[in-house]
Structure formats: C-alpha cells, structure tokens
Amino acid sequence: MPLLPFDLKSFDYPRRALIDFMNRCIALHSSGIPIPYIWGGSNLETGVDCSGLVIIGLQRAGILPLNYDNTAAGLRTTKVGLGRRYTKTDTDPILPGDLVFFGLNRVTHVGMIYNRERNDFIMVEAAGGDSKVTTKEKAYAAHAWVCPSLVSRRKDLVGFRCVIK
C-alpha cells in the first residue's frame, strides 16, 4: 500500500517550524536561487553543508541551542535536544522534520524528512558537494546546493532520528 503524503498543516510547533524552514529552502531551490552547499558551512547566505543545514533548522525551531555545532555523525548520537533514534525497521512513524542518516562504515550525511511520496520519503538536504566545495562558485559549478530529493536515491541509509522527545 503506498504511503500518503503528510498533511503538512496538521503539525504543531516545533515540527511546524521545521516544515516552514524546509518550505523556504525548497522555494529558494525552485526559484533558481538555491542555498549553496559549502563544506563546513553554517550560514544560509554564504552556504551550508548537510549538518549545518539541519542544525540551523533545529535551532530555528527551538530544539537545539543557538551555540550548538556538530557533524552528521554527531547529530546521530548527541544527547542534546533530540529524541530517540530508530531504524527503518521500527514501527513508530517517521514524521516531517525527523532526521535521516546515511553512510557506509560511518555516518557521513544527514537530511530532514519533508514528506512522503508513494513508497518513499522526500527529504531536504545540502548535497552534491564534498570537501573541495568551499566557495559559491564551486558549489554552483558542481550543482551542489540545498534541495529536495528522495531518500531511496541513496543506497547507504543508516536510519532515522526523531527530533522531538
């Protein structure tokens, strides 16, 4: 049975704040002015990497403190502000704003669940770059930016993490 899309207006704060944040990121991408992926970046104007994007969203929703900084792997294990971890085999629902982690031997990427489409999830992520993408020019040349994408396009899914305890 296919998954039905979430009714994004039915969630309360802080999940609603995360959805609004992702809506703005998607709108920028759709307008042709996406937020660039910058390795180690943590500023929406100058560029973000995957963990920088997620941390900004969680800070704006009041889930993480403003001085918080971490990596994708650190977001998977931190005890600051976030709810429990669960794997794709658990029965608890995966909801908008929940985090999704990827990597082969260790966690190397994180995104935020935005919605569902058929039997898949749509996430918002900062992707397409690597440690060599350090300027906006390099980001745009590599097509590295914040964008929506399907979780299933990646083959290295590690698991999910609830953002609200």
Image (cartoon, rainbow, N blue to C red):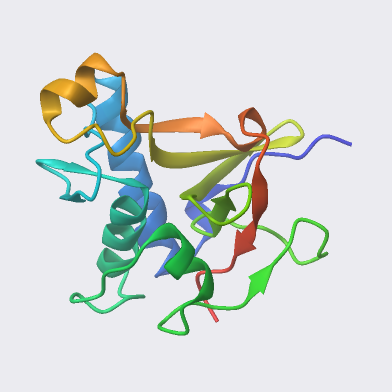
Residue 116: x %, y % from top left: 64, 39
**What is the quadrant of residue 125 in the picture?**
top left
Residue 8: x %, y % from top left: 51, 49
**What is the quadrant of residue 131 in the picture?**
top left
Residue 124 located left or right of residue 151: left
Residue 83: x %, y % from top left: 55, 78
Q: Front-most of 124 and 127?
A: 127
Residue 37: x %, y % from top left: 26, 36
- Residue at (18% x, 76% y) in the render: 67
Which quadrant of the rendered structure holds the N terminus?
A: top right
Up-down relation of residue 19 to residue 91 (above or below): above
- Residue at (45% x, 67% y) in the render: 75
- Residue at (73% x, 62% y) in the render: 87
Which quadrant of the rendered structure holds the C terminus?
A: bottom right
Residue 105 located left or right of residue 32: right
Q: Front-most of 98 and 46?
A: 46
Q: Please, which residue is most extreme toward the right here?
A: 1
- Residue at (28% x, 54% y) in the render: 52
